[in-house]
Image (spheres, rainbow, N blue to C red):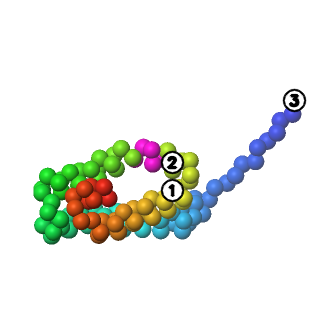
Amino acid sequence: MSSTATPTVEIDPQTVVRKVTRNVIPFVFVLYIVNYIDRANIGYASLQMNKELGLTSQAFGLAAGLFFIGYFLFEVPSNIALAKFGARRWIARILLTWGALATAMGFVHNDFQLITVH
């Protein structure tokens, strides 16, 4: 009977924290900024946007509510994709998509476009 010993790898906690700080925190920071801008955007814009786009309070409420319903429905599939593609690639994809949709919000002209983009 031959016994092969598996080498043990020592993980230095300071090295792990340093790598996470250097690689993950910048992505998370940028995502947080985009998230804040996106959430605040619709609230701040609602006063003038409702009048300019001819939105009723119901249409605005529907657009704002669909944002949270979409977030709820896509959270689990997004986490599955995160495991498949890796955190770095998936968070970068989220960042780009989120930024593009937040930018597209500036070009809507009616309630249907607002609901579609948001």
- Give, as a three-letter code, the residue at label 2: Ala
The image shows residue 49 at horizontal and vertical percentages of 18, 67
Distance (Cα) linking label 3 and label 2: 43 Å
Residue 29 in sight from this viewpoint: no
Mark 1 Cα-neighbour bin, 10 Å: few <14, some 14–19, many ≥20:
some
Residues marked 1 and 2 touching at CB (< 8 Å) = yes
Magenta highlight on residue 94: no
- Quadrant hosting residue 47: bottom left
Q: Say which residue label 1 marks.
A: 90
Magenta stretch secondary structure, dominant: helix
Q: Quadrant of the N terminus?
A: top right
Q: Quadrant of the C terminus?
A: bottom left
At x 27% / y 59%, what residue is drawn? 113
The image shows residue 20 at horizontal and vertical percentages of 53, 62
Distance (Cα) linking label 1 and label 2: 7 Å
At x 54% / y 59%, what residue is drawn? 88
Mark 2 Cα-neighbour bin, 10 Å: few <14, some 14–19, many ≥20:
few
Q: Residue furthest top?
A: 1
Residue 107 in sight from this viewpoint: yes
Q: Say which residue label 3 marks.
A: 1
Highlighted magenta segment, given as a residue range: 75-79
- Of mark 1 and mark 3, the one earlier in the sequence is 3
The answer to whether 110 appears left or right of 95 in the picture is left
Distance (Cα) linking label 1 and label 3: 46 Å
At x 54% / y 65%, what residue is drawn? 23
Q: Say which residue label 2 marks.
A: 81
Magenta highlight on residue 78: yes
